[in-house]
Image: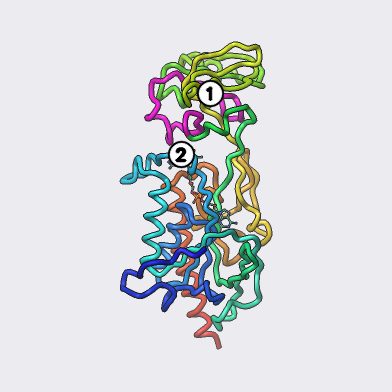
Amino acid sequence: MTEKSGRTRDGRAHGTAGAPGAGTGAGCDVVVVGGGAAGLSAALVLGRARLRTLVVDAGEPRNAPSSHLQGYLSRDGMSPAAFLAAGREEIAGYGVELLAGRVTDVTRDGTAAGTGTGDTGFTVLLDGGRTVRARRLIVATGLEDELPAVPGVAERFGRDVLHCPFCHGWEVRDQPFGVLASSAMSAHQALMVSRWSKDVTFFLHTVAEEELSGQDLRRLAAAGVGVVSGEVAGLVVEDDRLTGVRLADGSVHARSVLYVGPRPVPRTGLLERLGAELSETPFGAYPVVDPTGLTSVPGVWAAGNAVGFAEQVVHAASGGYRAAAAVVGDLLMTDLDAATAG
Ligand SMILES: Cc1cc2nc3c(=O)[nH]c(=O)nc-3n(C[C@H](O)[C@H](O)[C@H](O)COP(=O)(O)OP(=O)(O)OC[C@H]3O[C@@H](n4cnc5c(N)ncnc54)[C@H](O)[C@@H]3O)c2cc1C
């Protein structure tokens, strides 16, 4: 399915001058893999710089479970779907084509499609078997949240099972919070959420109290966070609302919000295929990038949650912008050098 209705800002129909014409199988200047905040922001900058740009998006943005997006100045409270719809409309206005689908593979070519510059390009394989050639790539594929395997957590994630008080803190302020020990940062999370409620219980779940540092214990006590030992077996839900946390011993702790620490799994498969250098962190392996998002593979940039788990929407959009601006300069200089080469 191709979304390309409407006209560009200067009245041109999409798919004509300045548009990638990817629907016809032609090459384009840049393929942006992923159409979340990072990818769409990159596409906006590329489109405005008159580059033939194709965004391929599998349509699974990380914040899809949430009905609202917070903390993005001027967009606070907007629905994630409305945010993306606005972004898609903006990029269409500059002739950028958005294709709903998945990039399944990328290979590096010897020469760029139809440029005559001699610099290398990429062949991008889409699900369904189609290929598109591009001179540059921006990988904005985001990450997946691997949730703790406690029954009920996945079903309620983004509603009253939450991961980030900056995304969902104000909205649930002063309610009885639980925090499930599920990552190395869980004690930190229990401390952080005490900014939004003075009624916080830290469920140690599979962690022994002795595993917490003396400093964590002192801080938890100072913040008034209760610490409860014992494995969490499930959630109590009434009228489609979280009302409690059930331990394996059968006891129930009344809580209306549960914070968890999902394991971030960055979508780095395409970058790995291209041989990009990755760096291990406690929150997954991310590509090594320069300040513009350039990876160790020439011609390949990355942005958003594909480069770091803590990238919020505003950061992802900013990273996409930075990567796109660098791509614009890189293509221009490459062409100028080719034109002046003896
Ligand atoms: C429940 C929840 C609530 C959140 N709330 C907030 C909030 O209120 N405020 C905030 O700032 N942040 C929030 N976040 C974080 C926010 O989701 C991320 O900051 C943001 O989504 C990062 O944008 P991105 O473009 O890097 O990735 P994404 O938005 O995840 O977009 C990546 C896109 O790439 C696509 N993709 C992946 N692989 C491929 C492929 N091979 N081919 C084609 N397409 C592909 C995906 O389908 C997806 O559409 C929340 C996160 C969660 C989990």
The disc at residue 179 is: 1
Q: Which residue is mark 2?
A: 66
Q: Amino acid at mark 2?
A: Ser
186 in relation to 39, above or below: above
Tell me what residue is drawn at x 58 percent, y 44 percent. Answer: 144
Mark 1 lies on a secondary structure that is strand
Q: Are marks 1 and 2 in contact (CB under 8 Å)?
A: no
SS under mark 2: loop
> Residue 183 colored magenta?
yes
The residue carrying pointer 1 sits among few (fewer than 14), some (14 to 19) or many (20 or more) residues within 10 Å by Cα, namely many
| Residue 116 placement: quadrant | bottom right
Report whether the residue tagged 2 is closer than 8 Å to ligand 1. yes
Residue 245, horizontal then vertical, whole percent: 55, 19
Residue 203 percent coordinates (x, y): 58, 19
Which of discs 1 and 2 lies nearer the camera? The answer is 2
The residue drawn where x is 50% and y is 51% is 304
User: Which residue is most to the front?
Assistant: 239
Q: Residue at x 49, y 23 (%)?
A: 242
Q: Amino acid at mark 1?
A: Val
Label 1 – label 2 distance at C-alpha: 19 Å
Magenta stretch: give its range. Answer: 159-186
Coordinates of residue 114 in the picture (x, y in percent)? 56, 81
Residue 3 visible in the picture: yes
Task: Evaluate whether residue 215 shows in this view.
Answer: no
Q: Position of residue 183 (x, y in %)?
A: 61, 30
